[in-house]
Image: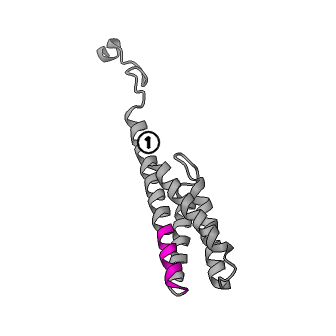
Amino acid sequence: IFGMLNMKLQKLRAALDVRLSDKTKEQNVARHLTGLKYHMDNALKWTVGCSDIGTLSDHTVQKVKQLTAIARHLAPAVFVFSKRIENVICQKEKELRRAVVEASVKGAATADFRPGMWGKKDDDDTAN
């Protein structure tokens, strides 16, 4: 699933580059798209077990949501494009968080609890 989300982000990134190369865009739209580009690049770096998952990924998701809210006032096409990017980034972050939780639960369930690891109770101790 992460491969599919990365592929979607890469396609959206390519479309974003095309939009940025269009010189007829006004300055506010270009600034908005540049902000999205930065956060998309961050999201493309995320992998399972990456230290960025958590606070940094949450910050990225919040910033993309803010940019999408601002895009509503720029142009309808920019808003729709921003919303598509937001959805993919949110989905990727959600799946990565789920993978981290599953890995920690699985790790706890398969931990090596040896019977004698806490010390062996001898029969002599119970006689006293």
The stretch in magenta equals 74-86
Q: Is residue 78 rendered magenta in the image?
A: yes
Q: Where does the C terminus fall, quadrant-wise?
A: top left
* Three-letter amino acid code at the position of disc 1: Ala
Q: Which residue is at 45% across, 66% downward?
A: 87
Which residue sits furthest bottom? 73
The residue where tag 1 is placed is 103
Q: How many marks?
A: 1
* Residue 26 x, y percent position in the rendering: 66, 85
* Residue 1 x, y percent position in the rendering: 44, 49
> Can residue 121 be seen by looking at this rendering?
yes
Q: Is residue 76 above or below residue 50?
A: below
Which quadrant of the figure has residue 108? top left
* Residue 7 x, y percent position in the rendering: 52, 54
Q: For the stretch drawn in magenta, what is the main secondary structure? A: helix
Image position of 103 (left or right of 34)? left
Q: Which residue is at 64% across, 66% downward?
A: 38
Which residue sits furthest left? 127
Image position of 69 (left or right of 27)? left
* Residue 65 x, y percent position in the rendering: 50, 73
Q: Which residue is at 36% across, 18% downward?
A: 121
